[in-house]
Amino acid sequence: MPIDLTRLKNLFGGKARNTRITAPAGERIYAIGDVHGRADLLEQLHDMIARDAQARGWARNRLIYLGDYIDRGPESRRVMALAMGDSPQGFSKVHLRGNHEDMLQEFLRDPRRASAWLNMGGDAVLREYGVPIPSEFGHEDNLIRASSQLAGALLPQEREFLLGLKPCYRAGGYFFTHAGVRPGVPLDQQSEHDLTWIRSPFLNYNKDFGAVVVHGHTICNEVEIKTNRIGIDTGAHATGKLTCLILETNKRWLLQTGHELLTAFAPP
């Protein structure tokens, strides 16, 4: 797919320039947005990341997944396997929890309270695990049965992966989480619910959070760049665009399926 360089320059603020916000010295961070069952795109992006890291030379490469591995797309299990696995090799990994993993866990704990998950993409997960899909408003016994069957179908390593997901991660001047943060609350005192679910109070806030927040959760047509946050959920399950933000010292650039290197950028 050809890249509209003029559009990208306008979007990312034109010529790249230095910024005060930095990643830890000697470290290169690759942050991946919401995957939602698109294992095909994650495989492509892993390959692009490996090539990018090799071309740029030595650094401590860290791969951060911003959550929402599952639901909507057809291959949630394979996405989890890819995220758990050693592709790309030589990277340390940080796995963050998204609201869709949160909903799955709640469905396993109490399906009567979490049945809405079925209409938010959870039906794709049940289908993949061979579990008959009950109606969100169906009889409680059907919901409980589906929850029990899903629990039995999860592999031990999948269950361990889901239980081990983290709510956030801090690296230098950047704070990584799935949904965002609550304005006015110190970053080290944020609630896990806000980190996983928040929208409007975070998205509408234009002041400093104490770090640049890198997040997914809220779909945008293009990467959303603000002075205080960077949103990289580009709706991969529907658009085919899975996005990776790369950070090294005071530099930033993007990789995206369907493109190669997009551009380097700094916030306006």
Image (cartoon, grey):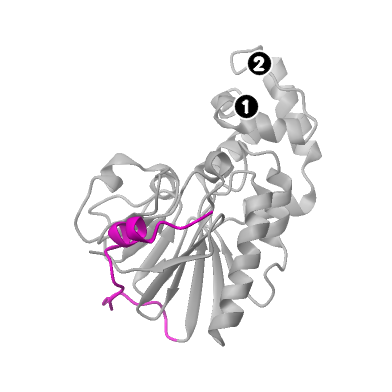
**Mark 2 element type:** helix
Q: Which residue lies under the disc numbered 1?
A: 111
92 over 131 or under it: above or below: below
Q: Residues within 10 Å of mark 2 (few under 14, many from 20)?
A: some
Chain-order first, disc 2 or disc 1:
1
Q: Are marks 2 and 1 in contact (CB under 8 Å)?
A: yes
Q: Residue at x 26, y 77 (%)?
A: 20
Q: Residues within 10 Å of mark 1 (few under 14, many from 20)?
A: many
Q: Was residue 15 drawn as part of the magenta stretch in this picture? A: yes
Front-lying residue, 51 or 250: 51
| Residue in the picture at 70% in, 58% down | 82
Kindly tell me whether residue 128 is visible in this rendering: yes
Residue 140's label in the rendered image is: 2
- Where 108 falls versus 22 (above or below)? above
Residue 227 percent location from the top left of the image: 25, 61
Q: Nearer the viewer, residue 157 or 207?
A: 207
Q: Quadrant of residue 8?
A: bottom left
Amino acid under disc 2: Glu
Q: Which residues are magenta?
A: 1-25
Give the image location of residue 70, x and y in percent. 62, 43
